[in-house]
Image (cartoon, helix red, strand yellow):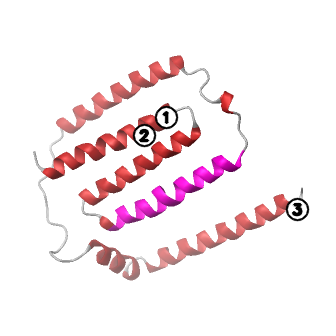
Amino acid sequence: MSGSFVAFFILSLLTIGGAVFMISFTRVVHMVISLGITFLSIAGLFVLLEAEFVAVSQVLVYSGAISILMLFGIMLTKHDASDEGTGRSWKNTFSLIFVAALFLVIFWGIQNTAWPGVTESAEAGVSNVKQIGLEVFTHFVIPFELVSVLLLVALVGAIIMAKKEGDNE
C-alpha cells in the first residue's frame, strides 16, 4: 500500500461520511459543518490529483465562502428547532437501502472497468496554474470577460431587488 492510496482512502471516507452526515443530521448547523468537511476532503482529493489550483479554489470558495454564507443565513433567519427531525424513520431505512445499492453498483462498475494507462499530460516542471492562466487568457478571453459581465449584472440585479424589498417595509 502506498501513501497516496492511504490518503485517497481516508479522504474518500471523509468525503462520503461528511455527505452522509449532512443528509442525516437534524440540526442545520451540524449539516453545514458536515458539508464543510466534505468540501475540505474534496480539496484534498484535488491535491492528490495534482490539481493544486482547483484545490485552493475549492477551499477558498466552497469551504470558506459558501459554508460561512450558509451559517450566516441560518443564524439570521428564524426557525423553530422543534420542526427539525420529525417523521424520518421510514425515510432513514429507505435512504440506507438506496445508498447501499448505489454503493454496490458503483463499486461493481469501478471494479469491472478497463482503465487506460497513465499518460503524461503535463510537461515536467510546468505548473498547472500557469497552464490554466495561459489557456484562459489566450484561448478563452471572451468567455472569461462575458462571465465577469454576467456576474456584475447579477450583482446589480440582486442589489436592485434587495432595495425594492427594503422600500416596501
Q: Are marks 2 and 1 in contact (CB under 8 Å)?
A: yes
Residue 132 drawn at (x, y percent)? 34, 74
The answer to which image quadrant residue 46 occupies is bottom left
Type of amino acid under label 2:
Ala
**In this rendering, is residue 129 above or below 90?**
below
Locate the C terminus by quadrant: bottom right
- In the rendered structure, which disc, 1 or 3, sits on the residue that comes first in sequence? 1
| Tag 2 near tag 3, CB within 8 Å | no
Q: Let me know if residue 94 is in the magenta part.
A: no
Q: Amino acid at mark 3?
A: Asp
Instruction: Tell me if residue 141 comes above or below residue 111 in the rendering.
Output: below
Name the residue beneath numbered marker 2. 19
Report whether 126 appears left or right of 86: left
Residue that lies at the very extreme toward the bottom in this rendered image: 138
Secondary structure type for disc 3: helix
User: 145 or 129, which is in the foreground?
Assistant: 129
Residue 2 position in % (x across, y down): 11, 49
Which residue appears at 46% of the width and 49% of the height? 36
Q: CA distance from mark 1 to mark 3?
A: 37 Å
Of labels 2 and 3, earlier in sequence is 2
Dot 3 corresponds to which residue?
Answer: 167
Label 2 crowding class (10 Å Cα cut-off): few <14, some 14-19, many 20+?
A: some
- Spatial CA distance of label 2 from label 3 is 40 Å
At a point 22% along the width and 31% down the height, the residue shown is: 108
**Which residue corresponds to mark 1?**
23
**For the point 41% across and 60% down, which residue is it?**
58
- The answer to which quarter of the image holds residue 52 is bottom left
Pinpoint residue 12: horizontal percent, then vertical percent: 29, 43
Start and end of the magenta stretch? 53-77
Q: Quadrant of residue 103?
A: top left
> Judging from the image, what secondary structure is the residue with disc 1 in?
helix
> The residue under label 1 is which amino acid type?
Ile
